[in-house]
Image: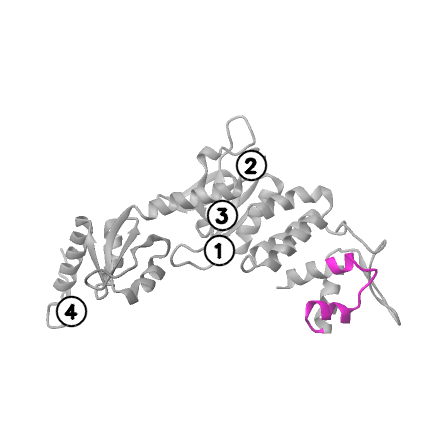
Amino acid sequence: MRADRLIQALLLLQGRPQITAAELAEELEVSVPTARRDLEALAMSGVPIYPTRGRGGGWRLVGGARTDLTGLTEGEVTSLLIGLSQSGHADPERIAAVRKLVRAMPAPFREGAQRVAASTVRDAPWGEVADEATSTTVAALQRAIAGQRRVHVDYEGSLGRVGIELVPLVIGNRGSRQYLLGAPVQDGTDAADVERLRMYRIDRVRELRLLPEPGRAPDGFDVAAAWARMVARVEDLRGAARALVRVEPWAVRALQDRFGAQAFVLEAEPDDDGRALMEVRAHRVDALAEQLAGWAGVAEAVGPPEVRAALRELGERIIALYQSDGAPRTRHPL
């Protein structure tokens, strides 16, 4: 990603009296024209670098061999950091780049940058995932976190579209789906009331507006612990209905892939019938029955009775629908 390269180029410039496009190309493993364009992009964005021509020439930082990124505005620095935090997975190189960027920032910018970096979480997916939410919404939320500001969001929830004013605290990913942990402020303060912390799907945010009022995380707020608690709470809600299932051994892995964190192997060793015992979960009994119906050839729900009854009812509806000679049934108006 180009944002990664620009940060690396800036850090290389910081550690050397000067660097040529060819030297930068070798360091970044890109072509010389690409390296030259990256250097020109840094200069155009306001980074205090300039080229010197002729023998022994190259690109140098204004004022000496080191910089604290004072050529960047706070908004530009935050934009670079947001680009890094949004791109790809949390591989070691990207984590290292974010840390180096934060360390290299001037003191006035560092606190906001640290809040953005600390509030960004990547996690394993919940089952199937949707397309990634627009980066503009995430960027706006991260800017609010950096500046300790409240936001107003129009959110499309299960009860329809509602307007919510809250303090954004954590931006988390489960696979490619993104979530916001946010809370309203405590009465009479500008600190978020974490007792009212909620998780919001960012792809359901229809509009977002940055508010002038301050909003910050309370002292001692633990991002990782808050994320873990909310994930556990959602997992409990998603797994309110449970079923014990006897599964053909070769299908255990496939069932785990389908149900994700809602599938558990209880007895890996085959029973007398040659099947393994698993527990699978869903948010409702009917939803669990619908998911299990497609596995009827390899998995049998042995309990509880309400799941077996829901499967039986579903089977009866399917039989009633398809027991005719194949001609579509005519629906008569009421």
> Residue at (80%, 59%) from the top-left corner?
49
The residue where tag 2 is placed is 217
Q: Amino acid at mark 2?
A: Ala
Q: CA distance from mark 3 to mark 4?
A: 44 Å
Q: Amino acid at mark 1?
A: Ala
Q: Position of residue 101 (x, y in %)?
A: 68, 52
Q: Earlier in the sequence, mark 2 or mark 1?
A: 1
Q: Residues within 10 Å of mark 4 (few under 14, many from 20)?
A: few
Q: Which mark is residue 328?
A: 4
Q: Earlier in the sequence, mark 1 or mark 4?
A: 1
Q: Residues within 10 Å of mark 2 (few under 14, many from 20)?
A: many
Residue 195: quadrant of the picture: top left
Q: Earlier in the sequence, mark 2 or mark 4?
A: 2
Q: Position of residue 119 (x, y in %)?
A: 56, 45
**Residue at the outermost left position:** 324
Q: Amino acid at mark 3?
A: Glu
- Secondary structure under tag 3 reads strand
- Secondary structure under tag 4 reads loop
Q: Which mark is residue 133?
A: 1
Q: Amino acid at mark 4?
A: Pro
> Residue at (26%, 49%) from the top-left corner?
242
- Evaluate if marks 3 and 4 touch, with contact meaning CB atoms under 8 Å apart: no
The residue where tag 3 is placed is 207
Image depth: mark 2 or mark 4 in front: 2
**Which one is nearer the viewer's eye here, 41 or 311?**
311
- Secondary structure under tag 1 reads loop
**Which one is nearer the viewer's eye here, 324 or 57?**
57
- Evaluate if marks 3 and 1 touch, with contact meaning CB atoms under 8 Å apart: no
Start-end of magenta stretch? 11-31
**Magenta run includes residue 219:** no
